[in-house]
Image (cartoon, rainbow, N blue to C red):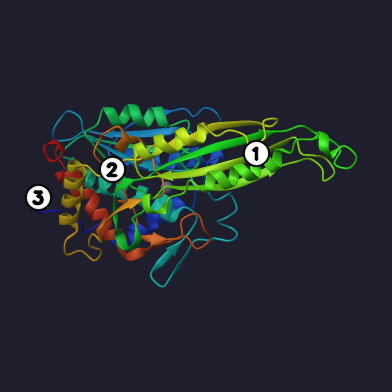
Amino acid sequence: MSDGLAFSDFTTESLLETVRQWVAIESPTQDVAGVNRMADHAEDLLVAAGAAIERIPGTDGYGDILIGRIAGEEEGPGILVLGHIDTVHPVGTLAGPLPWRVENGRAYGPGIYDMKGGNAMAVAALTHLHATGKRPRLPVSVMFIPDEEVGSPFSRPHIEAEAKRHAIVLVAEPSGEGGKLTVGRHGIARYYLETTGKPAHAGAYHARGRSAIREMARQVLAVEAMTDYSRTITLNVGTISGGTHENMVPISSRACVYVLVPTAEAEAEVRGRLLALQPHDPDVKLDVTLGLYRPSYAKTPAIQRLYDHAAALLKGSEWPAAGERIAGGGSDGNFTGALGVPTLDGLGVIGDGPHTHYEHIEISCLVPRTRLWARLFETLSRDLVA
Ligand SMILES: [Zn+2]
């Protein structure tokens, strides 16, 4: 650990103002202009931190991917910092149900916890190093993603390509309860079930029909019965639709299953069972398709060393490491962890209420956590994860 770090400019006030500026730009995933305004702001900050900028224009209705690269003291594969700049909150949330406000040591605003606070801290740490004439030990690439909240369909190949060029991935997603860091994540997948029956007037000709909804109802029970809490496998039929009129035997029905699995083996097992589902009624067609998914990743010895290193750096701080967790929700860290690149996630802000109208952060975490980022940049080495 290096001495002489001057953290005098890491004040709670200055960091909170930085976070406020991030939150002031509303950037729901679908609003390309909003997400790109957020990217413009992040780009200005990265330039001020001494970064060389690359921008990958968004396609398919998504905003741009922004990458800022900062040279290290050493050359070679370095650290990839991942953050997403999109949120789930529609434009107008800031002027409506979730205005910026500071109350009882907490700051509220759309996306402040998930995950503009974390993005702001990671960049502020780099700005600090630059302003004090220092470089990170390893080269650092900061990658801001425009489509994480919908599963990163546009960004995934770019994230995976970058991860393969780096030795370590740090993710600025929010911390777990009380400041827990994330050392593994479950896999999540969406499956779509579609049943196609035979239509008939529900009065005189009911017997001629084959109900797509009736078939779907049986499939829903079969799918949910695959849930096994003892193995952390859950299948949730989250949405369902079907039918066109109450006096018609319904010709079609559609359902979406949200699957959570702890391991690649469990994922393969559940996938096999879902894709093998057969209709109970031979006259009804059943189609099962896999939608977006994020693979699971488990803690490796290298991730353990990253965690231990971060926990040591946090020792004695106002928010020491509160332990580790395997997170149920997905992040872009799923992609990098599943590739085998040592990934430490949950390095962002401490708070609560992601995706809600009480989303907030604990203001007192800003200084210690930004300091953690700066020290990670100064100290992380390839030896640690070799
Ligand atoms: Zn997030």
Q: Report crowding for label 2: few under 14, some 14 to 19, many 20 or more residues within 10 A (C-alpha).
A: many
Ligand 1 under 8 Å from disc 3 Cβ? no
Real-space Cα distance between discs 2 and 1?
33 Å
Question: Mark 2 or mark 1, which has the lower sequence index?
Answer: 1
Secondary element at image label 1:
strand
The percent position of residue 160, horizontal first and vertical second, equals 34, 30
**Ligand 1 closer than 8 Å to label 1 CB:** no
Residue furthest out toward the right: 204
Determine whether, in the image, residue 213 is placed left or right of residue 4. Answer: right
For residue 254, which numbered disc appears in the image? 1
Labelled pair 2, 1 in contact (Cβ < 8 Å): no
Residue found at x 37% / y 43%: 83
Per the image, the residue denoted by label 2 is 298
Q: Is residue 267 at all visible to an observer of this figure?
A: yes
Question: Residue 316: image x %, image y %?
Answer: 16, 64
Q: Amino acid at mark 3?
A: Ser
Q: Kindly report the distance in space between the C-alpha atoms of the residues bearing marks 1 and 3.
A: 58 Å
| Label 2 secondary element | loop
Q: Residue at x 58, y 49 (%)?
A: 90
Residue 238 in picture, x, y percent from top left:
57, 48
Q: In the displayed structure, does residue 270 sit left or right of residue 160?
A: right
The quadrant in which the C terminus is found is top left
Pointer 2 residue Cβ closer than 8 Å to ligand 1: no
Q: Amino acid at mark 2?
A: Ala
**Residue at mark 3:** 2
> Which of the two discs, 3 and 2, sits closer to the camera?
2
Q: Secondary structure at mark 3?
A: loop
Residue 133 appears in the rendering: no
